[in-house]
Image (tube, rainbow, N blue to C red):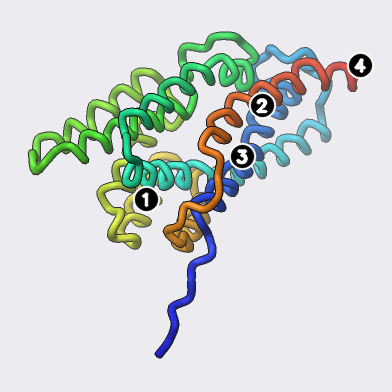
C-alpha cells in the first residue's frame, strides 16, 4: 500500500513566498521606476542615469517586475482559504478595510512619490472587494441572483476606484473560490484570465505550481505581520529612493 506523499508547502510558506516576490516586484516599481529611471518626472535624481546604465537598469527592472507576477495569485488563494476557515468573516473584511486605508499614503508615495494619487489604489482594497464577493457567495443560500451581484458589484467598484489589478483581481478571487474543488479548472480559468487581459502576467504560472503543492495546513504565522509589512515596506522603499539614494549619488 502506497503512502501518499505529503505536500511540502503550508499556508505560511506560501505567504512568505508571496511576500518575498512582492518585495522584489516593488523594488523595481519604486526604487527603479520612480527614482532611478524617473518614469514620473518626480525623482530627485532624475537624469542621473542615461545611455547604457539606464538600459541596464531597465533590464533589471523588467526581471524584478516579472518575478513579482508570482505574488498576486498566491495572495488571492490564501484570501479564499482564509474566508473558508475564518470564524468571523466580517472581522476579516474589517481588517482588510482598515489596512487598505492605512496603506494608501505609503502606496502613493512609493509608486508615485506623491501623497495622494486618486487614479491608483493599493492591493488591500482589491483583496477587500474580492473578500466581499466571496462573502456574498457564501451567504447566497441557493439564491442564484446573488452570483452576478457578487461578481459585478465588487468588480465595478474595483475598476471605478482604480485598485491594483482592478476588476481582474476581483474576478480571479471569485474564480479561486468557485473552482476551489477543481484545481485544474481553477488553474485554467485564473491563469487564462490573468494572461488574456494582461500578457505580462505569464510568469504567474509558477504561482499555480506552488499552490498545487499546498498541504492544507496553516503553518506558523503572525496574523498581523503581513498587514503591517505591506505599508511598512512601501514606506521603507520610498525613504530609500527619496532620501538615501540622492545622498549616495550626489
CA distance for labels 4 and 3: 27 Å
- What residue is at 73 percent from the left and 21 percent from the top? 35
- The one nearer the camera, 6 or 86, is 86
Mark with earlier residue (3, 1): 3
Residue designated by label 4: 250
Task: Determine which of the numbered discs, if any, sits on residue 181 in the image.
Answer: none
Residue designated by label 3: 65
For the residues bearing labels 3 and 1, Cβ distance under 8 angstroms: no
Residue designated by label 1: 192
- The answer to whether 85 is drawn above or below residue 133 in the figure is below
On the image, the x and y values in percent for residue 187 come to 37, 56
Q: Please name which of the two marks, 1 or 2, marks the residue nearer to the observer.
A: 2
- Image quadrant in which you'd find residue 44: top right
Disc 1, SS: helix
For the question of whether residue 172 can be seen, the reply is no
- The one nearer the camera, 202 or 99, is 99
- What residue is at 38 percent from the left and 47 percent from the top? 81
CA distance for labels 1 and 2: 28 Å
- What residue is at 73 percent from the left and 15 percent from the top? 43
On the image, the x and y values in percent for residue 41 come to 68, 13
Mark with earlier residue (3, 2): 2
Task: Determine which of the numbered discs, if any, sits on residue 30 in the image.
Answer: 2
- Image quadrant in which you'd find residue 237: top right
Amino acid at each position: 500500500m502506497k503512502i501518499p506523499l505529503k505536500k511540502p508547502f503550508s499556508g505560511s510558506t506560501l505567504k512568505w513566498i508571496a511576500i518575498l516576490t512582492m518585495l522584489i516586484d516593488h523594488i523595481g516599481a519604486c526604487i527603479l521606476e520612480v527614482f532611478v529611471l524617473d518614469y514620473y518626472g518626480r525623482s530627485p535624481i532624475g537624469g542621473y542615469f542615461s545611455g547604457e546604465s539606464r538600459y541596464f537598469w531597465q533590464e533589471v527592472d523588467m526581471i524584478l517586475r516579472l518575478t513579482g507576477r508570482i505574488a498576486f495569485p498566491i495572495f488571492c488563494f490564501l484570501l479564499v482559504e482564509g474566508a473558508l476557515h475564518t470564524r468571523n468573516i466580517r472581522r476579516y473584511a474589517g481588517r482588510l478595510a482598515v489596512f487598505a486605508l492605512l496603506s494608501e499614503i505609503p502606496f502613493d508615495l512609493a509608486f508615485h512619490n506623491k501623497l495622494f494619487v486618486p487614479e491608483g489604489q493599493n492591493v488591500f482594497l482589491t483583496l477587500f472587494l474580492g473578500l466581499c464577493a466571496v462573502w456574498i457567495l457564501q451567504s447566497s443560500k441557493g439564491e442564484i441572483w446573488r452570483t452576478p451581484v457578487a461578481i459585478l458589484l465588487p468588480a465595478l467598484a474595483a475598476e471605478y476606484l482604480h485598485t491594483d489589478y482592478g476588476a481582474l483581481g476581483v474576478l480571479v478571487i471569485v474564480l479561486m473560490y468557485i473552482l476551489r474543488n477543481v484545481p485544474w479548472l481553477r488553474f485554467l480559468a485564473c491563469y487564462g484570465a490573468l494572461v488574456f487581459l494582461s500578457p505580462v502576467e505569464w510568469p504567474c504560472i509558477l504561482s499555480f505550481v506552488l499552490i498545487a503543492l499546498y498541504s492544507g495546513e496553516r503553518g506558523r504565522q503572525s496574523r498581523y505581520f503581513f498587514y503591517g509589512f505591506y505599508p511598512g515596506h512601501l514606506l521603507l522603499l520610498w525613504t530609500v529612493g527619496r532620501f538615501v539614494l540622492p545622498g549616495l549619488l550626489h
